[in-house]
């Protein structure tokens, strides 16, 4: 009788055990709830200074008193900032509140206010998922249904807004820890200074801004000091840049600076950096040849005059003996098919990809490796 009873129990349990066996990779997810951890506990990449009012800002608090208001406000955006962590969770969630819940009519909300998660696969960073904003306060599942194994993650922050708070959610049965792999390397970052395009306009998601693409390709921390419409050679920004022990400086301000501003400020701006870093490569970048200048003659004349001016400044500094100053023509920056811009000016993901492909070998060749 007992044998028959155990046989019956076995027959009844067999299908359940088979199902559990099949579902083993996601058992942790099924049994666990999501627990949120303050992202402030984990390393933050992409900052030029730690003396900011709050964690997810780019300009020092001292600039609040001396900077032009638009520049200061843009400095509170988190473009180029990224969190590094590791976890064996079967899913990664995020909960974040943005400062402004900002929107634009030519850029996706995910690019403006969202998050982008990458996972380390060997030595390559692979896209894992995006946190798409649903309002000022968002809770989102970025990736799920993973096997419960330890992975290294890189979480890019919003390009045109900034988090007031940020939490990372993992299974309650999982662990979340400090990264163990030193990638991207946080020694002698590559520093970029410039305009709205540099800030990330108009990438569809944060990971597609060219500085974030290059951070993954170079495996080197990149600092994004792009200020939409306000890359106008403000000297307090030069003061900040001069404090960074960078492996290379890329100065991409021409789209915002007028010819008059370049005449007045460019050489002083460059000299400030050069005085602090006499042997560090500095790359000057031309104004992009925007996709509509073959029709818009006013814009074509403006681009040509600005590029003539930056070339004149470069030639003069080279004649004065700066051997670590370099120049990048925008001739091949975004291709000739007209498909690399959203509005004729700001880049699509294709434009950012092409620009990153142009910059990568130059930076790889010139940057100081340590």
Image (cartoon, rainbow, N blue to C red):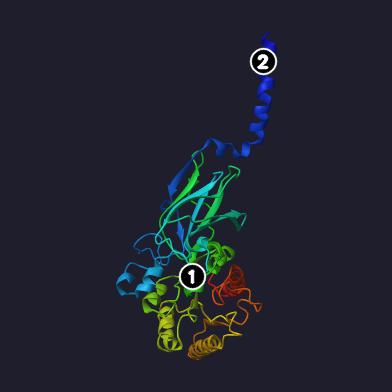
Which residue position is annotated with label 2? 6
Residue 248 shows up from this direction: no
Alpha-carbon distance for marks 2 and 1? Answer: 68 Å
Camera-nearest residue between 297 and 97:
297
Camera-nearest residue between 345 and 262:
345
Identify whether 165 is placed above or below 64.
above
Residue 122 in the image, given as x and y percentages of width and height: 62, 54
* Labelled disc at residue 186: none
Whichever of callouts 2 and 1 sits on the residue coming sooner in the sequence is: 2
Which residue position is annotated with label 1? 199
- At x 54%, y 35%, the residue is 31
- At x 50%, y 50%, the residue is 140
Q: For the N terminus, give its image quadrant.
A: top right
Quadrant of the rendered structure where residue 67 is? bottom left
Residue 334 in the image, given as x and y percentages of width and height: 61, 76
Q: Secondary structure at mark 1?
A: helix
- At x 44%, y 80%, the residue is 274
Residue 305 in the image, given as x and y percentages of width and height: 52, 90
Identify whether 303 is placed above or below 340.
below
Q: Secondary structure at mark 2?
A: helix
Residue 167 in the image, given as x and y percentages of width and height: 44, 50
Identify whether 18 is placed above or below 94.
above
Quadrant of the rendered structure where residue 219 is? bottom right
Outermost residue, top direction? 1
């Amino acid at each position: 009788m007992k044998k028959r009873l155990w046989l019956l129990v076995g027959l009844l349990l067999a299908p359940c055990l088979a199902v559990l066996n099949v579902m083993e990779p996601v058992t942790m997810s099924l049994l666990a709830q999501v627990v949120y951890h303050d992202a402030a506990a984990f390393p933050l990449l992409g900052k030029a200074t730690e003396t900011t009012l709050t964690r997810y800002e780019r300009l020092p608090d001292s600039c609040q008193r001396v900077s032009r208001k638009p520049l200061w406000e843009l400095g509170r955006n988190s473009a180029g900032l990224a969190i590094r962590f590791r976890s064996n969770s079967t899913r990664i969630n995020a909960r974040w509140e943005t400062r402004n819940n900002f929107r634009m009519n030519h850029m996706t909300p995910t690019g403006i206010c969202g998050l982008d998660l990458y996972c380390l696969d060997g030595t390559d960073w692979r896209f894992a998922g995006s946190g798409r904003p649903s309002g000022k306060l968002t809770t989102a599942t970025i990736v799920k249904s993973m096997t419960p194994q330890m992975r290294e993650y890189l979480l890019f922050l919003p390009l045109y807004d900034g988090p007031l708070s940020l939490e990372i959610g993992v299974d309650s049965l999982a662990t979340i820890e400090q990264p163990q792999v030193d990638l991207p390397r946080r020694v002698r970052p590559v520093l970029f200074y410039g305009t709205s395009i540099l800030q990330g306009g108009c990438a569809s998601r944060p990971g597609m801004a060219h500085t974030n693409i290059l951070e993954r390709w170079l495996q080197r921390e990149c600092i994004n000091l792009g200020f939409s419409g306000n890359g106008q050679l403000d000297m307090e920004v030069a003061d900040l840049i001069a404090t960074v022990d960078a492996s290379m400086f890329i100065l991409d301000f021409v789209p915002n600076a007028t010819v008059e501003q370049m005449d007045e400020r460019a050489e002083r701006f460059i000299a400030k950096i050069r005085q602090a870093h006499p042997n560090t490569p500095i790359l000057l970048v031309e104004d992009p040849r925007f996709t509509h200048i073959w029709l818009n003659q006013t814009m074509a004349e403006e681009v040509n005059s600005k590029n003539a001016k930056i070339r004149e400044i470069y030639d003069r500094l080279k004649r004065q003996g700066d051997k670590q100053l370099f120049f990048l023509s925008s001739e091949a920056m975004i291709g000739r098919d007209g498909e690399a811009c959203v509005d004729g000016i700001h880049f699509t993901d294709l434009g950012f990809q092409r620009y990153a492909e142009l910059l990568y070998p130059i930076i790889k060749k010139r940057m100081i490796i340590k």
